[in-house]
Amino acid sequence: MSETIKRPKRKNPILKTRAPTLPPDRRSRIALGLVRGAALGNLELQCCAACGAVQYPPREACVRCLSAELEWTVMSGRGELVSETTLHHSQELFFRERMPWRLGLVRLAEGVSLVVHLDARCGPAPSPVIVEAVLDRAGQAALVAKPDGGNTALADEPKLRNFTSDPRFRKVLVTDAKSPVGQAVVRAVLEAGADLVWAGHCEPWKNPPGWPAIAELPKVTLVPLDVTDTKSVNELAAELGFKVDIVINTAEHHRTFGIFGRAGVETARAEMETNCFGLLRLAQAFGPVMQARGADGETSAVAWVNLLSIYALSNFPQHATYSASMAAALSVAQALRAEMRVAGIRVVNIFPGPIDDEWNQLLLPPKLAPSAVARAIVGALKGSVEDVYPGDIAQDWLARFRDNPKALERELGR
Amino acid sequence: MKPHDPAPGMEILRGFTTALATGAIRIVDLTQTLGPDFPSIVMPPEIGQSRAFRMEEISRYDERGGAWYWNNLSFGEHTGTHFDAPIHWVSGRDLPNSSTDTIPVADFIAPAVVIDCSKESAADADFLLTPDFIKAWEAVHGKIPPRCWVLMRTDWSKKTDPAAYQNFDEVGQHTPGPDPDAVRFLLGERDVLGFGTETIGTDAGQAAHFLPPYPCHYYMHGAGRYGLQCLTNLDLLPPTGASLIAPPLKIQQGSGSPLRVLALVPSNPSGAPRP
């Protein structure tokens, strides 16, 4: 962990808490093509199918041959810093609050020039750089250039840190810390430098393997939280909602039934109750107070992570009702993302394939270890993405979903 | 019948209400508060689950409904202090009048005896009530009359920590209850109306391993008799002489229901509450 970011002082309570500002976020429909890749951490630019030219900024037609056959294509990111400048003045509130701000012009290996946010660790031009597509606090795609080699973690650069949701020095609520994934997430965010973790747990009479050790960890405080119980969610939010910087919603209810496998709706309802309505309850209880703290100093409220499932994209009929509840949860998460965006708070959705737990016992590997899910979550917070598909299965499903959702539907239904 | 010739019950009822008013008969509430924090029954996760008590506001003098406060509730039939009807168990499924809507209402008001097993349960969470224990109790307090509730006092309701109340370890729950012989004795030899406990079931925590499994459910409901569980304040009842008012909700084909259980207790001469 870098020492370049120092622990911020405690907040001066007599000063007004600043209101969140956002970088300019108007984009044309075409320009929004960038965000498709950036959401996943990919730098995608338009490539002309007719003449092969790569172009930036995005346009309706190829600047070389006027063809409209433009395909968003993943770039190498390798390039050379051609020139640089430092802004000392801006009409944009967001940048005014963060001056001075370094910008550069990069010539990509693919032959196109980009205006980028420039990492302070980049040498003077000309110098080799890596360009990445990131998400800014408004959730829009932005380009940053980092040095080619050495420590290039965004979260370790004081300005580019704005593009991340680094858990360092932050206070994190893990909504279900008892599950295998929940336990792994608690350990991972502590390792990533979180100040403390509130470990949510319900049904205190259940003591699954590993749980006593979590309770013993330094910086971990157990808090009662049952996302199916509005009273429980509201009480916890009233007690400590104003201190939570990152919510990681690991609460999930997973049963493995097709629609004919379990008569009635009670199992499906229990899945909806946790996976969909649980998120809704948490959002209503914790969302508004987090919004108010979107600019609360160096360790402001910054992110909200939802553990969803790759089954949210397309129903896996062997786990039909669980898939349905995750699709519903994804829809709520999208709405929450729109609500939280006004405060610069990022909503990150995690879409793992089958996790190696009891409910996926009968599925063949590969299955994701709970620790791999936790790593993906922390990686998303330290980086600058909002949709994460950890593991081979999730990547495969995503590719098939993007290529032909109908084909995926048929294949999953076999 | 002439209007000036009161029915014989009228005098009794008038005496009864007077006794309530004067405190000669006290009312003891044997009911736990129905809320989301009270422990709910735990089943293996892969089988069907009873919903825990949940309460969602409809409105509270706000934009959702101007001048009124009310809630929607959801919970399993066997939640909180609740009544078990005979139809709850497979052994009682074919009996007539075995669901909450058809049970004869006369059964909802009945005398109760209280067998104090609190010391034994404190010493051993797996304590089992046996016929010998019951006979020893009878030697002091007299024979259990027919059509009477038998309440097993364990003071388990005093465990306010939900984990201690449920008392799980890796082989399951450890809570006191009747052994199979005791249930057979209470039905066959004493013709009881039902069995009531302070724990989450009428059976012991380990009763899944008894022969038959869950003997209190199996035999009681097979005989058309009833269960009460998650009772509290049993320590405020005399060993004999109390009567219970315990009518479940009239749920169509209901297997049970949360309910308010009231005990009518003759006051001791001093009028002071019992210890």
Image: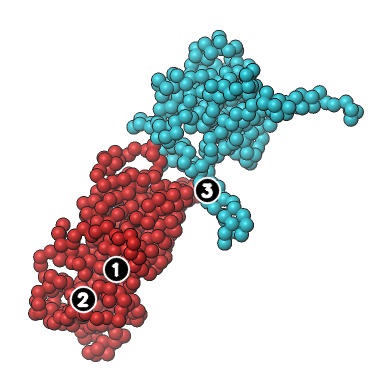
Chain colours: A red, B cyan
Q: Which residue is mark 2?
A: A100
Residue type, mark 3 in image: Met
> Does residue B181 appear in this view?
no
Give the mark toward the camera: 3 or 1.
Answer: 3
Q: Which residue is mark 3?
A: B55
Which subunit holds the residue at mark 2? Answer: A
Do marks 1 and 2 both belong to one polypeptide chain? yes
Q: Which residue is pictured at 67% across the width and 26% down the height?
A: B23
Q: Which residue is pictured at 53% across the width and 30% down the height?
A: B231
Numbered badge on residue A39: 1
Marks 3 and 1, how far apart in space?
38 Å
On screen, A314 above or below B81?
Answer: below
x and y percent of residue A167 in the render?
Answer: 25, 57
- Numbered disc 2: secondary structure: loop
Q: Which residue is pictured at 52% across the width and 11% down the height?
A: B136
Q: Which is more toward the observer, A174 or B76?
A: A174
- Numbered disc 1: secondary structure: loop
